Amino acid sequence: MRTFERTAARATLAVLVVLAGPAASQIVFEPPVLGPAGDGGGVLSAHRLVVHDVTGDGAPDVLVVTGLGGPVSFMPNDGAGNLEPPVAVPDLASSSTVSFADLDGDGHEDMLGSKSLEVWVKRGLGAGAYAPAQQVTSFGQASGGLLFAAADVTGDDVPDLVLSRNTGLFQPTHLEVLAGLGDGTFGPPVVLHTSGFFDSHGVPRAGDLDDDGRNDLVTTAEGLQLFLPAGDDVLEEVRLPHDVKLARLADLDHRGGLDVVALGDDPGTLVIVLGVADGSYEQRVLTVGADLQGLVLRDLDDDGWVDIAATGTDARTIVLRNLTGGVFAPDVTITNAFPARALEAGDLDGDGRVDLVAVGATQFVDALEVMTNHTYRDDEPFTDLGEACPGSRGFPVLLAEGTLLGGDATELRLANGPQGSASWLVVGSTAVNAGFAGGVMVPSPDRMIGPVVLNGAGRARLVARWPHDVPSGEQLWLQWWIADARSRTGYAATSAVRIDTP
């Protein structure tokens, strides 16, 4: 098994603060829908989520990790995005991390958990069945902390264990690797690095940062640290000048190798680190909101570029669109019901678009929130143009559906508006982008449909058959405006949507 020694950290570029311009077209999410909850099922005090096909039916389920002696449970997905009540995983209870990997090469993914300061494995049997958990480490400590990842870092195509392990009260924290032996067991721990701080958010990450075909490691115990194999028995450490608490890896700029995005310790900050061909790192710090707790890196609009979603204590999820090359701009803000502690992503409803899942809490209630991705594809006749104006409930949303073929049903929905308020659908033949009531009225006000009174959920719905005589290429601009007595200007508005008749 390979062992490692540290070498001197390499120099880094200065921190850049980047403010990008607005995106040309919006990513669209439906307002959050509350999922099943229950303190016995694991949502109470949840601090980590995993989206994974636990049941083996092809649909990603949502696994909830509470830590601190609490339960681990998963919510089965029916394949249409509907989550069923939590199912407990009692033999991994109190785990602070849960992960999946095929440790023994039998084609079935195993379930791993960090229970009682040890790593335990439930061997996958196929078809959603798992054997009882077996302990695979033997540290024998009574206090401390343990976070882990399962990834091949020794280069033999067998998953290894990468641990961030605090060895006890007032004791150091070790970054360790236990080499996978290919049969579901592991070799002895090899200490790669020792620090004096344990980051309870800091699950170690593994991925190829420098495009050399070997997985590197990223940790957050002492700021943002990168550990790159630089040859046999040598590990090069790159320490970047950022205090962070959670990191994710993805290829943001298509220049080869994975890049890093981390939540900064400074409230509302994102740290973006892009690898450069000369071995240096381009670093950016973005300020996007309140104290951030959850982070996702996924292609949310199917344009081939990985986007960023982050959520936190101000009950908002901020989506930053990758405009190409790792340059990001704020694209859409989702109004959540609760401040969030964790965020994950997966195609829950099987429509090919990546949805978001957050777990949030107030003083009295914990809840899972599912945000369904409604971003319009290139082959759909709708384009979201932005320019939403927030009201007393945050940002209202216009959701359009239909083919715009003659005789087919077309549906226009308004969601997340103030309950019981009057609303008008503004329909125009051109875009005028005129200032109005503190926002921007995008369509020319050629026709106003309304007033339509929002129901008790703050929703309205218009359905009609698309006329047969609308010529191909005809364009219309739509936008809902809502009377909102509790908003600053007395009105709220959705994003505008352009219709292009096929």
Image (cartoon, rainbow, N blue to C red):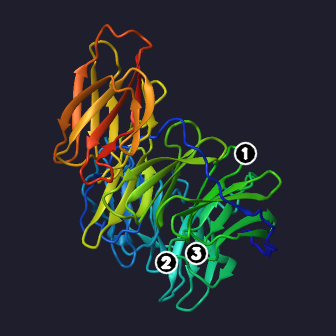
Percent x, y for residue 392? 29, 54
> In front of the other: label 1 or label 3?
1
Residue for point 42% across, 55% down: 317
Mark carried by residue 255: 1
Instruction: Say few, some or many: other residues with alpha carbon within 10 Å of mark 2 (under 14 / 14 to 19 / 20 or more).
Output: some
Whether residues under marks 2 and 1 lie with C-beta atoms below 8 angstroms apart, the answer is: no
Residue for point 16% across, 43% down: 455
Percent x, y for residue 251? 64, 49
Whether residues under marks 1 and 3 lie with C-beta atoms below 8 angstroms apart, the answer is: no
The CA distance from mark 3 to mark 2 is 12 Å
Identify the element where label 3 is drawn.
strand
Q: Residue furthest bottom?
A: 170
Query: As shown in the figure, which amino acid type bears the numbered disc 1?
Result: Arg
| Image quadrant occupied by the N terminus | bottom right
**Image vertical order of residue 157 relative to residue 237, above or below:** above
Residue matched to label 2: 118
Residue for point 28% across, 48% down: 490
Q: Is 10 positioned to the left or the right of 357 in the image?
A: right
Query: As shown in the figure, which amino acid type bears the numbered disc 2?
Result: Glu
Place residue 497 in its image quadrant.
top left
Percent x, y for residue 357? 38, 54
Instruction: Say few, some or many: other residues with alpha carbon within 10 Å of mark 3 (under 14 / 14 to 19 / 20 or more).
Output: many
**Image vertical order of residue 193 relative to residue 393, above or below:** below
The CA distance from mark 1 to mark 3 is 29 Å
Of marks 1 and 3, which one's residue comes earlier in the chain? Answer: 3
Mark carried by residue 164: 3
Q: Which residue occupies the foreground of this view, 21 or 291?
A: 21
Q: In this view of the protein, can residue 187 be seen by the observer?
A: yes
Mark carried by residue 367: none
Percent x, y for residue 193? 69, 77
Identify the element where label 1 is drawn.
loop
